[in-house]
Image (tube, helix red, strand yellow):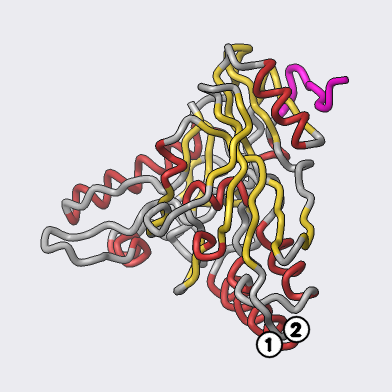
Amino acid sequence: MTEYFVMRDASLKRFNTLRLDVKADTIVMPHTINGFVQALRAFKDKKIVIIGNGSNMMFDQDYFDDSTVFIITSMINDIELNDGEIVVEAGTRLNRLAWFSCEQSIGGYEFCEDIPGTMGGALIMNAGQWQYAIGQYVNWIEVYNYETDQVERIEPDEAFFAYRYSRLTQMPVFMLRAGLSAPKGDYNESLEKMLYYRHERYVKQPRNFANAGSVFKRPKDKDGNSLFVWKLFDGVNLRGFTSGGAMVSEKHPGFIVNTGNATVADMKAVINECITRVKDTYDVQLELEWRVIR
């Protein structure tokens, strides 16, 4: 029995946080880990794009034909405490992990509360903030290896994760689930931290418009010193710059937002204007942090 369903000629708008109304010939939604593996095998001759929460990404075109298959993992989201470990499926959002840990009086995961991604994406990029990163807590990762056509378990060594990086990026695998450590914590302390983290982000970030998080990686000058993107943008009057429905946020210019009905072309126009002005004025080359789906 097939444990996934397929949508044809459907919109990806509700599957990306920029809310771009991009159409795809084939969208697949597995509802179990087994269904995820079934889908990966069934469409192995296609280009497969995995979407979790759809954050930190944008599309490069308005329509994807049947040569590309989008697999949405949002229904693969079980999380449980099992033999002293937190077992988390790939499509589980990180804020659910934070609240689950708090409710179980497990410490260490408060930083996940307001990170918009899912466990699968977090493992790939070793997501984190402040002094914390998800790689600190990983005991094992279950993956589907598309070269061997097998489900395998990886037990990371100390060098497996680095800052915003994991070896998974160099491996022929798709993430299925992970086992995380469960250090003892205090419910009230965890709750206080999570509310603080959420407050800090809501105060500083543009939550009134759809967005996909910070657009550009933090650049460096010729001497290797880190630069703040928002300061560069303010120096070239980019705050509030608009093309169609896309706009450099007036609240935090490190973000590009969808003010309502932005198209892929609108997003590209704003991104290109930002890159051009910063390059022409400061001779600094901006690099996208977003994952671009082509």
Residue shown at the point (78%, 22%) measured from the top left: 7
Q: Are marks 2 and 1 in contact (CB under 8 Å)?
A: yes
112 relative position to 102: left or right = left
Taking the image as shown, residue 25 lies to the left or right of residue 244, namely: right
| Residue found farthest to the left | 223
Residue drawn where x is 78% and y is 74% of the image: 104
In the rendered image, residue 277, in percent from the top left (x then y), is placed at 27, 49
**The N terminus - image quarter:** top right
Label 2 and label 1: CA atoms lie apart by 6 Å
Residue 163 visible here: yes
Is residue 134 part of the magenta span, yes or no? no
The reply to whether residue 248 is in sight is no
Q: Position of residue 251 (x, y in %)?
A: 51, 67
Q: Which residues, given as a range, are shown in magenta?
A: 1-11
Q: Is residue 107 above or below residue 229?
A: below
Q: Is residue 29 left or right of residue 237?
A: right
Sort mark 1 into few (<14), some (14-19) or many (20+) by Cα contacts within 10 Å: few
What kind of secondary structure does the magenta stretch mostly adopt?
Answer: strand
Q: Amino acid at mark 2?
A: Tyr
Helix, strand or loop at mark 1: helix
What percent of the width, then of the height, locates residue 42?
A: 69, 16
Q: Which residue is mark 1?
A: 189
Number of on-image labels: 2
Q: Residue furthest right?
A: 1
Which picture quadrant has residue 185? bottom right
* Nearer the observer, 229 or 50: 50
* Residue that extends furthest to the front in the rendered view of this protein: 83
Residue at the spot of label 2: 187
Q: Secondary structure at mark 2?
A: helix
The residue that appears at 50% across and 46% down in the rendered structure is 124
